Image (cartoon, coloured by chain):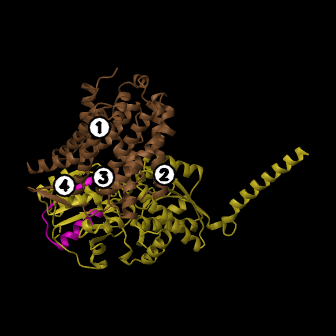
């Protein structure tokens, strides 16, 4: 029982960070219908930003996260305006090639700037934990979870309550109708891509103190974030949040009861089953 | 007038091209044509294995310069395998048939080195494996394949021998990544543990690169083993130890099966590396001829401490370059010379021998180290010890 609680808890906390990555990806897909294969690399950029600010300026990642978010937002907007916008109406494979190319550009730039060495960001809480009834809770992971929840909550309120949020949702629902209603879909797309990139960057910053950093680290998150997005229903923000938590939980619990090497296959196995029986995802609307 | 100008320009270009070709061809070879040798170097320059691949490159480059100082000019033709066996294999074909190299140095990982070994045998080109440790590589009776570093089995044997000399543990848990390196080190470990009467209570693999190993570590903690044996290629070692501390796993000793547990980065993480045992092919402190000097020059040139990968590749490159120049680059003669010769250097004595089912395997001795307050101390074998081992692990502070 004790080990179960322990595994479930750390899985859930890890899932919070996964959710943040998934939400960013699903938002971009929802608004632009573009699958962003550079998403993992944006997480990587966030990790390097955190590492740079920590090692050069001694700013703790949980403070620098408020700087990386606008930074990555800017990067996202530039990426959308300069590149993605041009393939908005192109065939899906062209969009995929473009985003994969952008991802390679990002990871190889990082390699050029920082070499391919693994960078370790060690804070005072990197390996520290709270003990509650004999269950240990990783400090780094708990802080990350709290920030992730705050961010996701803020995003939800923003999407639901503000005019701009409404414009984003309208664009996601029907791009042409939104345009006819006087919404500047170009600007809304840039905004959505910026927010998506910012969330990826935030997630990167949040895991930096408990993970390690290298130029190709994004790949580890890329595949997982697709699973999360499809699991939750493509384009559904709430779905991605639930999906992220679920993936974290399943991974952790399957590592407890099965050989640890199988934990990814459990996730992908369940994912395949879901695709077979509920292809629109847990909370997605069916698409034609 | 215009035509003449164009003609003169073209002549100029031709002349330049000609001069460049002559210069390129003539510069190294003209002085001592007999000592110019070509060596193909397959390594993971990009891809996930690149961070460690860089150490191999640095080691080889330093050796190339040292050979040059001795009057042996080696042309090192580098190929990137991205860490993938099939790319390494086509790199070998390119080097052997296109560039016509005398010998192959590398590749880095066990999977790529093993794939290349079969082809090297087929093409009858000597291959010297510098760091890959999978046992099979030198157990297939391939007489063109040589290896300078100790095999995977030795990692586990040295570690277990060391702890058994410090105390009397009864149980052992294994957690290792599902790669060639991880499985071969740990299966050797499991076999040797059983031979020494240790009970294996957990046998867990993991997919490298995962950010969360907490549930696996919790499961192991519940089994309360005396020893925890971990194998990690890269920075996962740091994650495993951080999370061990988080969940409060405290066996009598943590044994880190090389690689990720013997990097300068791991050493620097005092909070979590303290009192962890690891095993290494090489450390600057061990006192083999030229080891300290090599470490000093390496640090000056590349701005970081040499890892064992760098030292092994350096030693391998020196052996290959020296031997190849002696036989004028002939592949068959080089093979014979490698099989019979002996060398001395930063890895101690090097001799490629047939023993215990291995062929042309250097019987390299490994050093067991323990991190004590951020510094690696050699604690085993007794001949090379620099300090006393702390055993058992007193627990996390």
Q: Which is nearer the eye, B137 or A178?
A: A178
- Density class for disc 2 (Cα within 10 Å; few <14, some 14-19, many ≥20) is few
Magenta span: B155-180
Q: Going by the image, does A255 lie left or right of A195? A: left
Provide the secondary structure element on which disc 4 rests. Answer: helix
| Percent position of residue A138, x then y | 20, 56
Residue B217: assigned label: 4
Callout 2 secondary element: helix
Q: Colour of chain A?
A: brown
* Disc ID at residue A109: 2
> What color does chain B have in the rendering?
yellow
Q: Are marks 3 and 2 in contact (CB under 8 Å)?
A: no
Q: Residue furthest right?
A: B1
Chain letter of the residue beneath label 1 in the structure image: A
Q: Which residue is mark 1?
A: A228
The chain to which mark 2 is attached is: A
| Cα–Cα span, label 2 and label 4 | 36 Å
Residue B62 is covered by the magenta coloring? no
């Amino acid at each position: 029982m004790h080990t179960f609680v322990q595994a479930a808890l750390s899985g859930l906390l890890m899932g919070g960070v996964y959710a943040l990555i998934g939400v960013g990806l699903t938002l971009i897909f929802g608004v632009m219908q573009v699958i962003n294969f550079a998403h993992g690399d944006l997480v990587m950029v966030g990790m390097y930003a955190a590492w740079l600010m920590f090692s050069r300026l001694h700013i703790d990642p949980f403070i620098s996260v408020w700087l990386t978010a606008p930074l990555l937002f800017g990067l996202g907007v530039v990426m959308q305006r300069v590149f993605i916008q041009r393939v908005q109406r192109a065939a899906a494979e062209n969009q995929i090639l473009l985003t994969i190319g952008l991802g390679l550009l990002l990871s190889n730039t990082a390699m050029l700037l920082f070499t391919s060495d693994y960078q370790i960001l060690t804070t005072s809480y990197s390996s520290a934990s709270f003990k509650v009834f004999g269950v240990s809770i990783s400090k780094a992971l708990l802080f990350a979870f709290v920030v992730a929840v705050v961010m996701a909550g803020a995003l939800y309120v923003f999407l639901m309550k503000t005019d701009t949020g409404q414009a984003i949702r309208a664009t996601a629902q029907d791009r042409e109708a939104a345009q006819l209603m006087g919404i500047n879909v170009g600007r809304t797309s840039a905004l959505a891509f910026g927010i998506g990139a910012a969330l990826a960057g935030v997630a990167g910053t949040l895991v930096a103190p408990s993970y390690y950093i290298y130029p190709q680290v994004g790949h580890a998150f890329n595949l997982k974030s697709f699973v999360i997005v499809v699991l939750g229903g493509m384009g559904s923000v709430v779905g991605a949040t639930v999906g992220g938590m679920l993936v974290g939980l399943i991974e952790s619990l399957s590592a407890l009861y099965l050989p640890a090497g199988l934990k990814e296959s459990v996730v992908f196995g369940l994912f395949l089953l879901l695709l077979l029986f509920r292809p629109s995802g847990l909370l997605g609307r069916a698409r034609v | 007038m215009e035509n003449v100008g164009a003609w003169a320009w073209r002549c100029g270009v031709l002349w330049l091209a000609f001069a460049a070709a002559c210069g390129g061809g003539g510069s190294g070879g003209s002085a001592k044509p007999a000592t110019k040798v070509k060596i193909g170097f397959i390594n993971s320059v990009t891809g996930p294995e690149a961070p460690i691949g860089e150490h191999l490159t640095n080691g080889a480059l330093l050796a190339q310069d040292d050979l040059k100082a001795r009057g042996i000019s080696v042309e090192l033709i580098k190929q990137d395998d991205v860490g993938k066996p099939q790319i390494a294999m086509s790199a070998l074909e390119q080097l052997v048939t296109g560039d016509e190299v005398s010998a192959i140095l590398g590749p880095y990982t066990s999977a790529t080195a093993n794939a290349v070994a079969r082809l090297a045998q087929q093409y009858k080109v000597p291959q010297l494996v510098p760091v890959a440790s999978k046992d099979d590589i030198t157990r297939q009776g391939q007489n063109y394949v040589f290896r300078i570093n100790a095999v995977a089995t030795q990692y586990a044997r040295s570690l277990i021998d060391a702890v058994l000399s410090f105390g009397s543990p009864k149980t052992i848990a294994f957690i290792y990544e599902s790669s060639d390196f991880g499985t071969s080190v740990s299966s050797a470990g499991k076999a040797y543990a059983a031979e020494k009467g240790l009970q294996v209570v957990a046998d867990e693999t993991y997919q490298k690169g995962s950010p969360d190993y907490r549930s696996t570590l919790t499961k192991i903690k519940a089994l309360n083993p005396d020893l925890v044996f971990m194998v990690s290629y890269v920075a996962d070692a740091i994650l495993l130890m951080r999370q061990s501390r988080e969940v409060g796993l405290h066996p009598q000793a943590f044994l880190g099966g090389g690689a990720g547990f013997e990097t300068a980065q791991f050493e620097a993480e005092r909070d979590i590396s303290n009192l962890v045992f690891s095993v290494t092919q090489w450390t600057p402190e061990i006192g083999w001829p030229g080891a300290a000097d090599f470490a000093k020059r390496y640090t000056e040139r590349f701005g970081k401490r040499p890892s064992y990968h760098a030292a092994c590749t350096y030693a391998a490159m020196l052996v290959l370059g020296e031997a190849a120049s002696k036989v004028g680059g002939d592949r068959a003669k080089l093979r014979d010379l490698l099989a019979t010769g002996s060398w001395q250097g930063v890895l101690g004595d090097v001799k490629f021998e047939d023993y215990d089912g291995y062929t042309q395997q250097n019987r390299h001795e490994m050093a067991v180290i323990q991190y004590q307050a951020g510094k690696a101390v050699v604690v085993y074998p007794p001949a090379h010890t620099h300090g006393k081992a702390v055993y058992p692990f007193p627990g996390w502070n």
